[in-house]
Amino acid sequence: MTSTKKLIGQERRAQLLSWLKEEKKTMTGSDLAEKAGVSRQVIVQDISLLKAKQEPIIATSQGYMYLEQVSEKKKVQRIIACNHSRSQTKEELDCIVDQGVTVKNVIIEHPVYGDLEASIMVSNRQEVKQFIERIKTTNAPYLLQLTDGVHLHTIEADREEQLDAAYQQLNKLGIIINNN
């Protein structure tokens, strides 16, 4: 559904906000660019301007998402400490999403920059597969490679029991860093 005219400046940013608020899933920069009749780079700049105006937009591995579209039902969250190799990333993420849990982000402690956080936002195996494929096709490093595998995830679910189940499964795999 390409726009018939090129959207300009404020009008385009207002329309981007509208599209992101209406959409129930992520939208790629390329899709937004096509709809707005501009380049993907213009969309990246527009999203940066909207974020600077405190609009709750996040960039995920699947595209952009407006955060207020999260359901009104209260979700529970937990931060878990993990340690594993790059090759175990898919197994870790699949283990979590199989319990009905969303992996919101990954956080590492960098020796110079402090805490670095990247949005992941995967909730099912298909999204995990897309995330892993995107890493492979872009040849991007995993953040855990900067910390010899040590990292945190914020995980989210409808019920505490789901978070407990994900934690227990990761612990069985030897991925959880225990407090001992």
Image (cartoon, grey):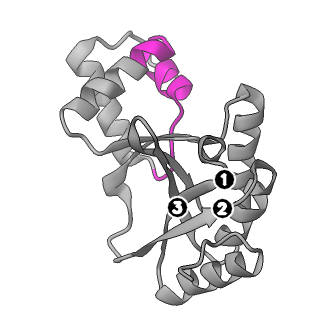
Q: CA distance from mark 3 to mark 1?
A: 12 Å
Indicate whether 46 appears above or below 132: above
Looking at the image, which residue is at 51% across and 44% down?
26
Q: CA distance from mark 2 to mark 3?
A: 11 Å
Q: Residue 134's x, y, as percent?
A: 70, 36
Task: Identify residue for label 2.
Answer: 83
Determine whether the residue tagged by mark 1 lies in a helix, strand or loop. Answer: loop
Tell me if label 2 and label 1 are in contact, CB under 8 Å. yes
Q: Residues within 10 Å of mark 1 (few under 14, many from 20)?
A: some
Give the image quarter of residue 47: top left
Q: Amino acid at mark 3?
A: His
Tell me if label 3 and label 1 are in contact, CB under 8 Å. no
On the question of residue 63 being in view, the answer is yes
Q: Residue 172's x, y, as percent?
A: 75, 81
Give the image quarter of residue 141: top right
Position of 101 compared to 49: left or right? right
